[in-house]
Image (cartoon, rainbow, N blue to C red):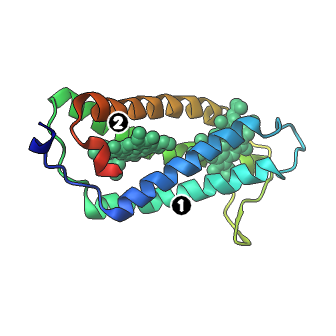
Amino acid sequence: MAEAFTVSKYDPFARLLHWLIVVLVTAQYVVGWTMPDIHRGTQPVGLIDIHLELGVSIIAVMIVRAVWRFVRKEPDVVDGSAWARAVAYLTHGLLYLLLIVQPLMGWANASSRGWRITVFGVELPSLAPTGSTIGHALGDVHGVLAWVMLGLIGLHVAAALYHHFLLRDGVLRRMA
Ligand code: HEM
Ligand code: HEM
């Protein structure tokens, strides 16, 4: 009885931003885990430079996305038990939060290493003093939160596939 469900979609811009983030974040994990080990005096070149640029793009896209979501609201929720909707809200909220906070910690770590972050030749502010303990510590938190976020993404993708293949309620089509 799939036709019994009328599913409202996310608007095209929200869908574009969602899939853009999927591509950027996937690339970011691959780069983050294949770039050379970083030691005192390592220069931000090659894959490390790509990691910084992708990371800043992720922050920028997430800010646009958060503003857009605030302005446009999400489409009406699909029916489901109260707890399932609560878990979905919580997961989405945490993903938004982590996708902004986690890269900011990487940036603080980069600042503490004395690396300059530039976008189109414009230098962005330093988030931690060079050589600072806090900037160093936030780099460790950045690595740990990458795993936490990966767990949430796994849960999120599993839920999307569960809706699509088992519940067949059109939730995946809202974002497709
Ligand atoms: C969603 C965005 C991001 C993800 C998923 C991500 C992921 C990762 C991962 C998986 C690592 C390797 C950690 C390890 O092996 O322990 C890493 C390291 C690092 N990332 Fe990111 N990153 C992101 C954004 C950023 C941004 C925006 C910056 C800076 C502007 C940044 C700077 C760094 C630095 C400096 C390291 C090395 C930290 C260290 O070894 O002390 N990252 N990141
Ligand atoms: C890096 C990976 C991903 C991240 C960070 C991510 C993040 C998010 C976020 C934050 C939302 C909430 C959107 C909003 O309310 O504005 C969302 C919704 C959604 N995502 Fe993802 N997503 C990822 C991958 C995927 C994949 C691979 C799929 C499909 C298999 C998917 C399917 C969906 C669907 C169907 C929704 C709408 C859920 C609903 O209508 O309640 N996502 N995603």
Q: In this figure, which residue is indicated by the disc labeled 2?
A: 160
Q: Nearer the viewer, residue 60 or 112?
A: 60
List x then y, in percent, for residue 100: 51, 49
Please state which of residues 126 and 37 is positioned toward the viewer in this rendering.
Answer: 37
Compared to residue 84, the image places residue 170 above or below, namely: below
146 displayed left or right of 17: right
Kindly identify which residue carries mark 1.
60
Q: Residue furthest bottom?
A: 121
Coordinates of residue 169 in the picture (x, y in percent): 21, 38
> Is 26 situated left or right of 155 in this image?
right
The earlier-in-sequence mark between 2 and 1 is 1
- Please say whether residue 23 is visible from this viewpoint: yes
What residue is shown at x 30% (from left), y 61% (from top)? 11
Q: CA distance from mark 2 to mark 1?
A: 25 Å
SS category of the residue bearing label 1: helix
Q: Can you say whether 3 is above or below 137 in the image?
A: below
Whether residues under marks 2 and 1 lie with C-beta atoms below 8 angstroms apart, the answer is no
Q: Position of residue 18 (x, y in %)?
A: 43, 53
User: Label 2 crowding class (10 Å Cα cut-off): few <14, some 14-19, many 20+?
Assistant: some
Q: Is mark 1 within 8 Å of ligand 1?
A: no
Label 2 beta carbon less than 8 Å to ligand 2: yes
Residue type, mark 2 in image: Ala
Q: Nearer the viewer, residue 127 or 47?
A: 47
Mark 1: few/some/many CA within 10 Å (<14, 14-19, 20+):
few
